[in-house]
Amino acid sequence: MKSNELTSIITKEKRWFVARCLELGVVSQGKTIEEAQANLQEAVELYLESFGDEDLPVTESVVALYPIRVPAHA
């Protein structure tokens, strides 16, 4: 079975974890990181079933996410 590798990011927003697929713009959520991951996986699969993957963007580079700190202005 062919598979595609996509990039996702999960952020904590109040009481929910929000998961986003960067290439497709698909978003889901869950009460735990694992639930958010599973829900995003399902949402992406449904998206691809509906719209296909012929024009799927290909990510060939490494994606690095890291926090930065900037001074707070009073």
Image (cartoon, grey):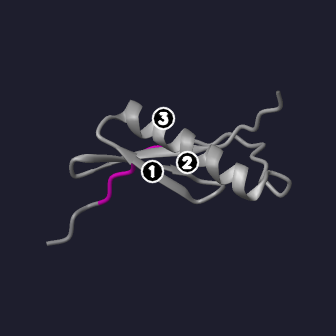
What residue type is disc 3 on? Ala
Residue range corresponding to the magenta coloring = 65-70
Return the residue at label 3.
Answer: 38
Whether 50 is drawn above or below 5: the answer is: below
Q: Is 67 contained in the magenta span?
A: yes
Rendered residue at 65%/53% (across/down): 47
Can residue 65 be seen from the camera position used here? no
Q: Quadrant of the N terminus?
A: top right
Whether 23 is drawn above or below 37: the answer is: below
Q: Secondary structure at mark 3?
A: helix
Crowd around label 3: few <14 · some 14–19 · many ≥20 (10 Å): some
Badges 1 and 2: C-beta atoms under 8 Å apart?
Answer: yes
What residue type is disc 1 on? Ser
Q: Which mark is residue 56?
A: none
Where is residue 59 drawn, in percent x and y?
A: 74, 46
Where is residue 27 drawn, in percent x and y?
A: 49, 55
Q: Which mark is residue 43?
A: 2
Q: Quadrant of residue 55?
A: bottom right
Whether 74 is drawn above or below 22: the answer is: below
| Residue closest to the far right | 54
Crowd around label 1: few <14 · some 14–19 · many ≥20 (10 Å): many
Return the residue at label 1.
Answer: 28
What residue type is disc 2 on? Ala
Tag count in the figure?
3
Where is residue 29 drawn, in percent x and y?
A: 39, 48
Q: Is 44 contained in the magenta span?
A: no
